[in-house]
Image (tube, grey):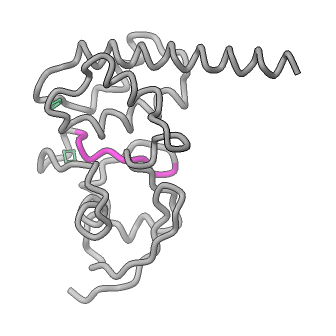
Amino acid sequence: MKKELITLKINGRTLELASEPNKLLLDVLRQDLGLTGSKRGCDDSSCGACTVQLDGVPVLSCTLLAASCQEREIATVEGIAEHGSLAAIQKAYGDWGGAQCGYCTPGFMMTVDHLLTENPNPSEDDIRHALSGNLCRCTGYMQMFQAIKAAIEAERKGRASEAQTAGAR
Ligand code: FES
Ligand code: FES
């Protein structure tokens, strides 16, 4: 199929590339842009390993045409580090052994990142509900759960410390 020029906004950068109009976002990310964090784990939209965010909302990049994402903000796991430092959820995964083989980890992180943005203080039920579309074949759910709770606590402390600093000015 003939390639066409498409423009994608990914992790805050605008990129122009030639791509087949029927190419999936996951394949463009991995094959054309070298953003291999997002994974293909199934063929039927059921595992969540390919999760990215589109305009801040988690979506399955294995079922989206890249060309349909033009003019939208795409975020991948490569973009969630903050100013060169690990995001709270990335650090907590390391501390709590949230990743075993790690194949599902990028997808989980994009879902958790959205959850914590929408709801900085989620209940355990909120966390379970948010993660229901992501599967871990290593079944390391308990470690992930601990890591997510640690990230929530770290972010809560960060906000409290920022508020204290602002109050002292
Ligand atoms: S690769 Fe499994 S849902 Fe996209
Ligand atoms: S850590 Fe291996 S699939 Fe989740």
Q: Which residue is drawn at 24% across and 12% down?
A: 142
- Splitting the image into 4 quarters, where does residue 93 fall? top left
Residue 131 vertical placement versus 70 (above, below): above
Q: In which quarter of the image is the N terminus?
A: bottom left
Left or right side of 72 for 33: left
Residue 40 in the image: x percent, y percent? 17, 50
Name the residue at 88% across, 22% down.
169
- Furthest residue to the bottom? 2
Give the magenta-colored segment's residue range. 48-55
x, y percent for residue 159: 65, 20
In the rendered structure, does residue 24 fall within the stretch colored magenta?
A: no
* Number of numbered tags placed on the structure image: 0
In the orientation shown, which residue stands out farthest toward the right?
A: 169
Picture layout, residue 119 above or below residue 164: below
Q: What is the x, y in percent for residue 129? A: 35, 21
- In the depicted structure, whether residue 40 falls above or below residue 19: above
Q: Which residue is drawn at 68% across and 14% down?
A: 160
Task: Residue at 31%, 79% (x, y): give it.
Answer: 19
Q: Is residue 55 left or right of residue 96?
A: right
> Percent x, y for residue 105?
26, 35
- Above or below, 120 against 153 in this view is below
